[in-house]
Image (cartoon, rainbow, N blue to C red):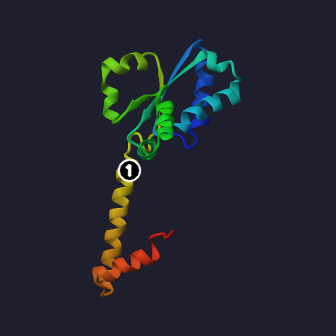
């Protein structure tokens, strides 16, 4: 299913299948760790605390995301950051590429009889690479536009720095 409000649709789906399934196995593949808690919160808000006795949630963190890059950087800055990162990932299945989900030994048991929900942006699509390509295309368009106005690259980069790059 594809929907703008993925949490509401997931909760609706659980409501539908809970009529026929006593124990529900949800696998959530996300690039944002906080969304795993949002899933639980949405289920509890609709069905009450007891729903978590019937629903097993297996979180798979697509850790090739910007969130992980930031978390790793923070983890390397201090012992507290490292401890926080370790705590954050301890109950997650962590993947470094979408292709790792093909590892039958690791994931067959997880996916067996599961309802799988995948966040598209950042999980299937690489947000980091997409942002880099957008920045590259924007930069090239700015250079081309400046050159059409008779500016050289140094002048264009000066204007870019002056108008587009935030200063502290």
Q: Residue at x 34, y 51 (%)?
A: 129
Q: Position of residue 82 (x, y in %)?
A: 46, 37
Among the 4 quarters of the image, the one containing residue 41: top right
Q: Position of residue 154 (x, y in %)?
A: 30, 80
Q: Nearer the viewer, residue 7 or 96?
A: 96
The answer to whether 71 appears left or right of 136 in the picture is right
Badge 1 element: helix
Count numbered badges in the picture.
1
In the displayed structure, would residue 155 be above or below residue 142? below
Q: Residues within 10 Å of mark 1 (few under 14, many from 20)?
A: some
In the displayed structure, would residue 88 be above or below residue 24? below
Q: Position of residue 116 (x, y in %)?
A: 47, 27
Farthest bottom residue? 150
Farthest top residue? 22
Q: Nearer the viewer, residue 72 or 136?
A: 72
Q: Residue at x 31, y 20 (%)?
A: 104
Among the 4 quarters of the image, the one containing residue 141: bottom left
In the displayed structure, would residue 120 be above or below residue 89? below
Q: Residue at x 34, y 35 (%)?
A: 98
Q: Position of residue 7 (x, y in %)?
A: 59, 36
The answer to whether 168 appears left or right of 155 in the picture is right
Residue annotated with mark 1: 128
Farthest front residue? 79
Q: Residue at x 31, y 75 (%)?
A: 143
């Amino acid at each position: 299913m594809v929907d703008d409000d993925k949490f509401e649709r997931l909760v609706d789906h659980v409501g539908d299948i809970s009529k026929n399934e006593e124990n529900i196995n949800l696998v959530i593949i996300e690039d944002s760790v906080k969304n795993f808690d949002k899933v639980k919160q949405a289920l509890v808000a609709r069905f009450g605390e007891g729903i978590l006795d019937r629903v097993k949630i297996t979180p798979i963190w697509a850790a090739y995301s910007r969130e992980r890059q930031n978390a790793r950087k923070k983890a390397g800055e201090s012992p507290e950051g490292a401890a926080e990162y370790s705590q954050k990932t301890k109950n997650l299945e962590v993947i470094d590429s979408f292709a790792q989900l093909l590892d039958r030994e690791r994931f067959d048991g997880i996916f067996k009889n599961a309802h799988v929900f995948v966040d598209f942006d950042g999980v299937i699509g690489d947000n980091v690479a997409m942002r880099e390509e957008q920045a590259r295309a924007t930069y090239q368009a700015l250079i081309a536009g400046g050159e059409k106005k008779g500016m050289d690259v140094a002048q264009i980069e000066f204007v870019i720095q002056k108008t587009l790059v935030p200063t502290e």
